Amino acid sequence: MTVMVAVPDSPEGRTALSAAIDEARLRGTDLVVLNLALDPLDLVGMPTDLDITVKERTGYADLADCVLAALDERAGKIDLLVIGMKRRSPIGKALLGSLSQRLLLEVDVPVLAVKR
């Protein structure tokens, strides 16, 4: 089985990646890194003791749709999804929606949500 991490270009994304590496090591499994940024992911410093696959974002303007599509591609093979979260006010949640919130509500696998 596999740990998947959604990594946007943000401090929260880097925190999620670090937590996912730790979880993959703990579980003795491989890691799928879903790069949600527009630029290629910087792989400098990635551990060599893990089997890491990087999947680039494809064709989805909505990042949650990109994550959901990647999960669908690997249906039944993902043990855990790791995401980063940032603190938002109640008004911010009501007005803008949230990638983290949508993933927490819609995915069919356990989710580890980490804060910076």
Image (spheres, helix red, strand yellow):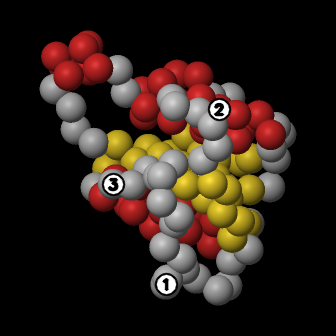
Residue 79: x and y, percent? Answer: 71, 48
**Which circle's residue, 2 or 3, is located before the other in the chain?**
3
Residue closest to the eye, 38 or 81: 38
| Residue at 70% in and 34% down | 69
Image: 110 above or below 34: above
Q: Which residue is mark 1?
A: 45
Residue type beneath disc 2: Leu
* Viewer can see residue 31: no
**Which circle's residue, 1 or 2, is located before the other in the chain?**
1
| Residue at 64% in and 43% down | 58
Q: Which residue is mark 2?
A: 68
Disc 2: CA contacts within 10 A as few (<14), some (14-19) or many (>=20): some
Task: Determine contact: label 1, label 2, CB under 8 Å.
Answer: no
For residue 64, side relative to residue 29 (left or right): left
Residue 97, quarter of the rendered image:
top left
CA–CA distance between discs 2 and 3?
A: 20 Å
| Residue at 68% in and 29% down | 108
For residue 80, side relative to residue 62 (left or right): right
Q: Which residue is mark 3?
A: 10
